[in-house]
Image (tube, rainbow, N blue to C red):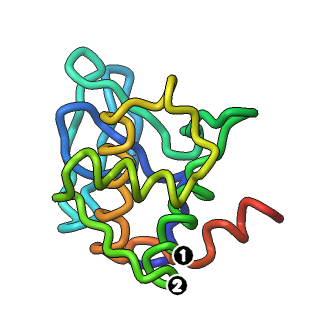
């Protein structure tokens, strides 16, 4: 897959690692494509839940921050702030990185599991070069 994909086209599927692109919709499930290897798979609605990335946000003290801005903030922190972000960090390191990227996130509503998942998604997108992470924040502001 190339960088012409948009974050809105990606979905998280329970039971499958990473993010996937929805290729086709069936009455009893979705056909999804793994951006890493291009393989397609049928996912039944009985076995899986689907979360479109375009609708995911992180709770903040005042409101919420959309996922494109979260990913962009992590990208800026890593590339301009000199931080190293991996999905192998321990929960305390992940929380510290997340606090730097989204300083006003709500610790009462954003769990360490949420932070771990967001960092895993970010690392997946960065490593697979599926999107241009440097432009995600700009798209949201337009």
Helix or strand or loop: what does disc 1 sit on? helix
Q: Quadrant of the N terminus?
A: bottom left
Residue 13 vertical placement versus 119 (above, below): above
Q: Nearer the viewer, residue 51 or 113?
A: 113
Residue 140 vertical placement versus 76 (above, below): above
Residue 3 vertical placement versus 115 (above, below): below
Q: Which residue is mark 2?
A: 80
Q: Position of residue 3 (x, y in %)?
A: 47, 78
- In percent of the image, x 52 and y 84: which residue is there? 80
- In percent of the image, x 50 and y 24: which residue is there? 108
- In percent of the image, x 32 and y 44: which residue is there? 117
Q: Nearer the viewer, residue 32 or 118?
A: 118
Q: Nearer the viewer, residue 18 or 31?
A: 18
Q: Position of residue 49 (x, y in %)?
A: 33, 25
Q: What's the CA distance linking mark 2 and mark 1?
A: 5 Å
Side (left or right) of 7 relative to 141: left
Residue 122 vertical placement versus 29 (above, below): below
State which quadrant residue 134 falls in: bottom right
Side (left or right) of 101 relative to 20: right
Q: Position of residue 11 (x, y in %)?
A: 41, 44
Where residue 76 is drawn, which disc sits there? 1
């Amino acid at each position: 897959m190339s960088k012409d994909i948009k974050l809105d086209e990606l979905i998280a599927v329970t039971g499958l690692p990473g993010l996937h692109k929805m290729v086709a919709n069936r009455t009893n499930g979705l056909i999804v494509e793994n951006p890493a290897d291009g393989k397609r798979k049928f996912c039944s609605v009985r076995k899986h839940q689907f979360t479109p990335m375009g609708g995911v946000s992180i709770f903040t003290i005042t409101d919420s921050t959309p996922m494109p801005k979260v990913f962009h903030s992590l990208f800026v922190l890593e590339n301009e702030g000199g931080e190293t972000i991996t999905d192998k960090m321990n929960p305390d390191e992940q929380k510290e990185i997340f606090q730097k990227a989204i300083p006003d996130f709500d610790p009462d509503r954003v769990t360490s599991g949420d932070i771990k998942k967001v960092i895993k998604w970010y690392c997946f997108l960065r490593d697979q070069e599926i999107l241009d992470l440097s432009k995600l924040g700009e798209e949201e502001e337009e």
